[in-house]
Image (tube, helix red, strand yellow):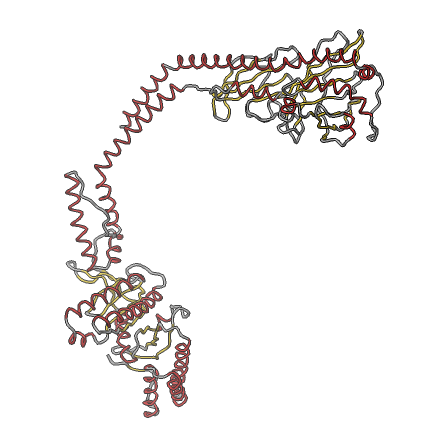
């Protein structure tokens, strides 16, 4: 399958490579045609937009000359050679500007778009100007409702704050100027870029630097054309008319509106951005500077590159950058247009490769799916075999495979699984796991080890068997054994054998178990609590309640496989095993439920379990003495106080202070009521008092 997929990929790559050259030629031809169309459109739009300042300068010259002939105020004002700065805001000298401003109002009223008409002197002083800008005053001019009139003076490169007034064409200029200004801001744009050579009456017109007005909403950028104003071959001043460049930016957007995906930038020779097709205003409000072509863009706009086509990659995306210099029709406007468009490179090759690749992937998936459908049952069977190796014998959605050989394997596995499931009911699962991990055949052997032996027996089961119906007895016994066995196994114990109604369990066998004394004691209390719940149910169903007795001992035993080569049984033997059985029987004497020896008691947590010392005994058939402790699931403070009082009385008894012990036990019974263990201790005290010196603190228990 791998070879077939690889062959298809190689063949697809060769086929795709054959069409690369032709595909690239078509792409280059298409891109060049689009570039030519866009640049021609932009060049035409720029020419149309910049022609108005050129024409307006001519009209302004004619209007000023005509006004000089007709208006003595303007004539006298323009011929002044020394103009002082108006610093007294209370003087109403702005009336001097009235005739001049009326002439400029007439000039700018005819401009549908924004305009700036200014007359300034050769010494740097600026004549009052009339400003109308797109977005703020276009509608005003069109409907003749309101204009903005402003003044500021530039002298030796110093600027005064710009002040402005709103007015209608019919408003009286004196009344407008005598009132407070309607707006104002610090004007910091360069009004005029003078030629490096001297200017005289024969000097040609020139374009000023870009001026930005970010405070407008929306912000604007203007550029103006300048012309010398002479009379009788004498330089009087300069006339400047400006046009705002927002329309140029709109033209750049329109140039790319035919579905092309890219951006267009218009940049002047100094590197300052004139306009963009992105709709962003090229002005930094924090630095108060125009961003240059390398400041905020990941790609580089290099004015030295005059090639018409250049490939570039920006942030992992292929682009084409087209450069067209001298886009403006005026020599002193060194404007260059940059077009950045997404490059549709190698789509044909890419598509061929992708088609071949996904075809191979699809074929591989189909082969894989077909193989999986055929072998799915084998996968499940393999998974179940792994679970069986861990003795996890629960089958989950195992189905018979369609292949004949796999069907035979499936049937054999089902038979083996059934045998193991039945086998583990006779042999503890812990023992089976131990044998499998040893990776060798079982054989007879015994080894010494520490273990906690657990015996649990039903009280008066023989009498119950004689009086109850067999089916009722069977149901109760089955439910009891199931519940008790589950609790023992959950606490880490291994059920060694069932001896009639008695359960023998081992802790810390066949594998080591930390805290096995604690686990066995906990299992005893949980079994007792579970029996209380079962009794409530049996009382309603059968009118029967059971009681059981549990004995626990910890010590050294001989553990291992006992038997012959024909049949083996894993168990443990030794004196401590017999002692655990006798401890379970000792519950009959003390009318207790759970008794443990001192070797077990030493290892359990006294904060977790409620215990009390019963006494020192010698069980039947044993020579050594054993201290027995009762473990109870009673957690009340009253029971704890009872246990404490009993242990104090037992201590007095062990110290042979019989009268004090008797008094303490009688007080205990009087205060707490009947307690079987305390009653037995009182009987032992009375017997000792009768015998005099011939008595022992060690109680000998009959079998």
Position of the C terminus by quadrant: bottom left
In the foreground, 457 or 696: 457
In the foreground, 695 or 147: 147
Q: Residue at x 78, y 24 (%)?
A: 153
Relative horizontal placement of residue 266, taking residue 563 as reference (left or right): right
Tell which residue pokes out farthest to the front in this image.
Answer: 170
Q: Quadrant of residue 582?
A: bottom left
Q: Quadrant of residue 527?
A: bottom left
Q: Residue at x 32, y 86 (%)?
A: 684
In the foreground, 337 or 644: 337
Position of the N terminus by quadrant: top left
> Picture coordinates of residue 485 (x, y %)?
26, 64
In the foreground, 363 or 142: 142
> Does residue 612 sit above or below 244 in this rendering?
below
> Does residue 625 sit above or below 475 in this rendering?
below
Relative horizontal placement of residue 190, taking residue 703 as reference (left or right): right
Count of picture labels: 0
> Picture coordinates of residue 249 (x, y %)?
58, 21
> Does residue 204 sit above or below 373 in this rendering?
above
> Picture coordinates of residue 143 (x, y %)?
64, 23
> Picture coordinates of residue 223 (x, y %)?
66, 18
> Does residue 22 sit above or below 352 in this rendering?
above
């Amino acid at each position: 399958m791998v070879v077939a997929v690889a062959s298809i990929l190689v063949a697809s790559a060769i086929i795709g490579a054959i069409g690369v050259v032709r595909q690239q030629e078509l792409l280059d031809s298409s891109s060049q045609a689009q570039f030519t169309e866009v640049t021609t459109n932009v060049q035409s739009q720029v020419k149309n937009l910049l022609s108005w300042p050129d024409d307006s300068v001519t009209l302004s010259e004619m209007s000023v000359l005509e006004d000089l002939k007709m208006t003595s105020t303007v004539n006298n004002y323009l011929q002044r050679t020394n103009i002082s700065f108006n610093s007294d805001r209370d003087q109403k000298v702005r009336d001097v500007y009235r005739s001049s401003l009326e002439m400029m109002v007439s000039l700018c009223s005819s401009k549908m778009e924004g305009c700036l008409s200014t007359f300034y002197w050769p010494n740097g002083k600026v004549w009052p100007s009339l400003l109308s800008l797109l977005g703020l005053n276009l509608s005003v001019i069109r409907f003749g409702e309101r204009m903005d009139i402003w003044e500021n003076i530039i002298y030796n490169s110093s600027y005064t704050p710009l002040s402005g007034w709103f007015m209608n064409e019919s408003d009286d200029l004196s009344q407008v100027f005598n009132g407070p200004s309607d707006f104002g801001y610090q004007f910091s744009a360069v009004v005029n870029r003078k030629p490096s050579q001297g200017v005289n009456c024969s000097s040609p017109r020139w374009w000023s630097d870009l001026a930005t007005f970010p405070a407008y909403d929306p912000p604007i950028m203007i550029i103006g054309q300048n012309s010398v104003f002479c009379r009788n071959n004498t330089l009087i001043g300069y006339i400047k008319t400006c046009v705002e460049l927002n329309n140029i930016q709109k033209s750049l957007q329109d140039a790319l509106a035919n579905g092309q995906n890219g951006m267009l930038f218009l940049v002047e020779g100094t590197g300052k951005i004139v306009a963009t097709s992105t709709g962003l205003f090229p002005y930094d409000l924090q630095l108060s500077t125009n961003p240059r072509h390398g400041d905020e863009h990941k790609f580089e706009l290099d004015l030295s590159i005059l090639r018409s086509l250049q490939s570039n990659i920006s942030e992992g995306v292929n682009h084409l950058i087209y450069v067209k210099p001298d886009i403006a029709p005026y020599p002193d406007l060194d404007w260059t247009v940059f077009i950045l468009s997404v490059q549709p490179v190698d789509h044909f090759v890419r598509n061929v490769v992708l088609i071949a690749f996904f075809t191979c992937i699809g074929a591989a998936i189909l082969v894989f799916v077909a193989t999986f459908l055929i072998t799915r049952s084998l996968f499940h069977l393999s998974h179940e075999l792994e679970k069986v190796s861990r003795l996890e014998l629960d089958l989950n959605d195992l189905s018979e495979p369609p292949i004949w050989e796999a069907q035979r394997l499936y049937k054999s596995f089902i038979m083996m699984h059934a045998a193991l499931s039945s086998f583990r009911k006779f042999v503890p699962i812990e023992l089976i796991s131990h044998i499998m991990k040893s990776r060798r055949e079982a054989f007879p052997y015994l080894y010494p080890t520490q273990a906690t032996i657990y015996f649990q027996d039903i009280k008066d089961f023989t009498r119950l068997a004689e009086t109850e119906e067999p089916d009722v007895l069977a149901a109760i016994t089955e439910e009891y054994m199931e519940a008790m066995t589950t609790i023992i196994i959950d606490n880490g114990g291994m059920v060694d054998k069932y001896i009639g109604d008695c359960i023998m369990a081992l802790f810390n066998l066949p594998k080591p178990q930390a805290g096995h004394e604690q686990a066995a004691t906990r299992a005893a209390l949980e079994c007792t609590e579970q029996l209380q719940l079962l009794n409530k149910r049996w009382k309603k169903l059968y009118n029967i309640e059971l009681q059981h007795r549990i004995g626990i001992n910890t010590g050294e035993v001989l553990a291992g496989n006992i038997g012959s080569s024909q049949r083996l049984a894993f168990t443990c033997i030794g004196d401590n095993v017999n002692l655990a059985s006798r401890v379970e029987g000792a519950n009959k004497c003390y009318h207790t439920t759970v008794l443990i020896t001192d070797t077990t008691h030493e290892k359990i947590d006294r904060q977790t379990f409620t215990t009390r010392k019963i006494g020192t005994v010698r069980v039947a058939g044993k020579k050594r003495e054993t201290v027995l402790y009762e473990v109870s699931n009673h957690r009340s403070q009253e029971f704890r106080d009872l246990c404490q009082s009993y242990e104090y009385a037992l201590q007095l008894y062990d110290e042979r202070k019989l009268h004090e012990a008797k008094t303490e036990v009688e007080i205990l019974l009087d205060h707490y009521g009947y307690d079987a263990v305390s009653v037995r201790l009182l009987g032992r005290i009375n017997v000792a008092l009768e015998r005099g010196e011939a008595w022992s603190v060690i109680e000998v228990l009959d079998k």
